[in-house]
Image (spheres, rainbow, N blue to C red):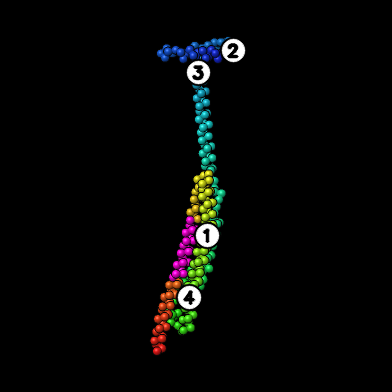
Amino acid sequence: MKKNLYRYAALAGLIAAAMLPAGSMIAPAAAQIGGIVHDPRNYAQNILTAARTLEQINNQIKQLQNQATSLVNEARNLQSLPTSTLQELQGQVDRTRGLLAEAQRIAFDVGDTQKAFDARYKGAALSGPQAALVANAEARWNDSVGAFQDAMKVQAGVVTNMGAARQSISTLVTASQSATGALQAAQAGNQLLALQSQQLGDLAAAIAAQGRAEMLDAARAAAAEAEGRERFRRFRKGN
């Protein structure tokens, strides 16, 4: 009961102070109830201090909440992409390289190419004995046929890789769209770039194999023309 009287007295003092004109504000008198002195002005100051303290606490709570949200976002950005197509891409590259390594008669090697041309396409190969001319002509024909067969095998391998590449693209695009952070999105993009590089490698391999076949066929035609001139020269000399 006494506590309620104290509160009513304090409230009455605050109301009375608030109703005074602006120019006639005077220090409120302390109220004495039951032998206990209650100062309304001190009570109001305590309430104001408590309100400010509560506001500071709320601000600190908001800062902690923002920091927690930031940490959660950073954790998401650091999560790795659960999907990887590296093994499939390496397998496709290895298959294409294997097809190129199976090149018949003349490998994709500068030294081997030079040796083959020296032996069958120029110089003594076009001016030797009759049996040697026939053998070299057959060897050049086999080179051309083998090169065209190699080109077709590489092209077939590239077409086969296209099916696997299509599946990889679908997987990576889906993973990119469902990425939860910056790292996952970046990793998906990097894998798509790797897939594009693999496809460019397949295209380069197909072009190289096709070009090799066409160049060998052109070299065969040029060698056959030179051999024909040699045969004609011998024919005339024999007459």
Q: Hey, what amino acid is under mark 4?
A: Trp
**Label ID, residue 44:** 3
User: In the rendered structure, which disc, 3 or 2, sits on the residue that comes first in sequence?
Assistant: 2
Q: Hey, what amino acid is under mark 2?
A: Lys
Q: Which residues are magenta?
A: 196-215
Neighbourhood count class around disc 4 (C-alpha, 10 Å): few under 14, some 14–19, many 20 upward: some
**Label ID, residue 161:** 1
Report the mark closest to the observer, 3 or 1.
1
**What residue do we see at 50% from left, 28% from top?**
56
Assign the magenta stretch its main secondary structure.
helix
236 is higher (above) or lower (below) than 17: below
Query: In the depicted view, which residue is nearer to us: 9 or 114?
Result: 114
**Label ID, residue 2:** 2
**What residue do we see at 47% from left, 78% from top?**
137
State the CA–CA distance, disc 4 to disc 2.
121 Å
State the CA–CA distance, disc 1 to disc 2.
91 Å
User: Circle 4 is placed at which residue position?
Assistant: 141
Query: In the depicted view, which residue is nearer to us: 32 or 150?
Result: 150
Magenta-drawn stretch contains 208:
yes
Q: Hey, what amino acid is under mark 3?
A: Ala
Report the mark closest to the observer, 4 or 2.
4
